[in-house]
Image (cartoon, rainbow, N blue to C red):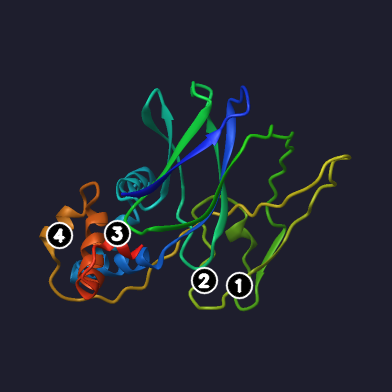
């Protein structure tokens, strides 16, 4: 695992804080994924189909064991305790994200946080601890009153609820324009908009040949994907420079 340990001064008795980051995934993570897919060969298509029916909790557990999300730990009683994780953000642009953390049982004046991730899998630009009290929040969840795809027409029913109906965008540039009826803002309060969506995408992969069964068995174990990333790094860079990979950071 890669990672960083940060210390934040605690201003008095504070039980809950917001850990704020600006970060993104690296292109090295994408590259490692592409090399993983190549090991499947002709078995990739049936493997991908089987994953459609696997539980989300099992997939998340595997992802965490491979350091793909950005895991946050809090030091309590001299030991690191897993608190939560930032989900993958993709490699294209930095993303602002926040975790709400409970530090009520941290007994020290210095709050220590460890951010941990797989080998070169994340790029972190900014981290801060927000101790300010949480303001009163009034939440209104709104479904779209209309959603129109210029080519496919009315897709409102596909986007109105969390169900088995999906709005599929098979072509680059596909889009839907959505309209919402927004209630009046309560007096004396401000307003923020959060787009809450759920869905999935499929990676387009064209691989062939015999599957590497010994490797695919190893990748199921915790850290197997990280080991692949390290092996690829060393074979691509360390041999060219003659230096240890840590010196290239």
- As drawn, the residue found furthest toward the left would be 214
For residue 246, which numbered disc appears in the image? 3
Residue at x 22% of width, y 66% of height: 234
Looking at the image, is mark 4 or mark 1 earlier in the sequence? Answer: 1
Cα gap from disc 3 to disc 2, whole angstroms: 42 Å
Mark 2 surroundings: few (<14), some (14-19) or many (≥20) residues within 10 A: few
Q: Does dot 1 land on a helix, a strand or a loop?
A: loop
Looking at the image, is mark 3 or mark 2 earlier in the sequence? Answer: 2
Looking at the image, is mark 4 or mark 2 earlier in the sequence? Answer: 2
Cα gap from disc 3 to disc 4, whole angstroms: 25 Å
Looking at the image, is mark 1 or mark 2 earlier in the sequence? Answer: 2
Is mark 4 in CB contact (under 8 Å) with mark 2? no
- Please name which of the two marks, 3 or 2, marks the residue nearer to the observer: 3
Cα gap from disc 4 to disc 2, whole angstroms: 34 Å
Is mark 1 in CB contact (under 8 Å) with mark 2? yes
Is mark 1 in CB contact (under 8 Å) with mark 3? no
Residue occupied by mark 4: 215
For residue 236, which numbered disc appears in the image? none
Q: Can residue 13 be seen in the rendering of this structure?
A: yes
Is mark 3 in CB contact (under 8 Å) with mark 4? no
- Please name which of the two marks, 1 or 3, marks the residue nearer to the observer: 3
Residue at x 37% of width, y 58% of height: 121
Residue 138, x across and y down, in percent: 74, 38
Q: Does dot 2 land on a helix, a strand or a loop?
A: loop
Residue at x 63% of width, y 69% of height: 176
- Please name which of the two marks, 3 or 4, marks the residue nearer to the observer: 3
- As drawn, the residue found furthest toward the right would be 187
Looking at the image, is mark 3 or mark 4 earlier in the sequence? Answer: 4
For residue 175, which numbered disc appears in the image? 1
């Amino acid at each position: 695992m890669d990672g960083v340990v940060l210390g934040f001064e605690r201003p008095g008795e504070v039980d809950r804080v917001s850990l704020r980051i600006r970060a993104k995934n690296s292109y090295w993570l994408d590259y490692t994924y592409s090399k993983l897919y190549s090991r499947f060969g002709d078995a990739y298509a049936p493997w991908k189909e089987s994953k459609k029916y696997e539980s989300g909790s099992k997939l998340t557990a595997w992802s965490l064991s491979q350091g793909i999300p950005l895991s946050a730990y809090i030091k309590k009683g001299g030991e690191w305790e897993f608190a939560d994780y930032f989900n993958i953000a993709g490699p294209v642009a930095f993303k602002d994200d926040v975790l709400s953390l409970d530090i009520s049982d941290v007994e020290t004046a210095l709050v220590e946080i460890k951010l941990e991730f797989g080998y070169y899998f994340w790029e972190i630009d900014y981290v801060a601890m927000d101790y300010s009290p949480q303001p009163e929040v009034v939440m209104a969840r709104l479904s779209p009153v209309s959603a129109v795809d210029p080519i496919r027409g009315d897709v409102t029913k596909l986007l109105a609820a969390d169900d088995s109906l999906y709005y599929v965008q098979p072509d680059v540039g596909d889009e839907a324009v959505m309209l919402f009826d927004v209630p009046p803002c309560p007096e004396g309060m401000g307003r923020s908009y959060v787009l809450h969506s759920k869905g999935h995408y499929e990676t387009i992969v064209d691989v062939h040949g015999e599957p590497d069964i010994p490797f695919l068995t190893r990748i199921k174990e915790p850290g197997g994907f990280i080991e692949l990333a390290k092996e690829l790094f060393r074979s691509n860079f360390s041999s060219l420079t003659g230096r240890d990979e840590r010196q290239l950071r």
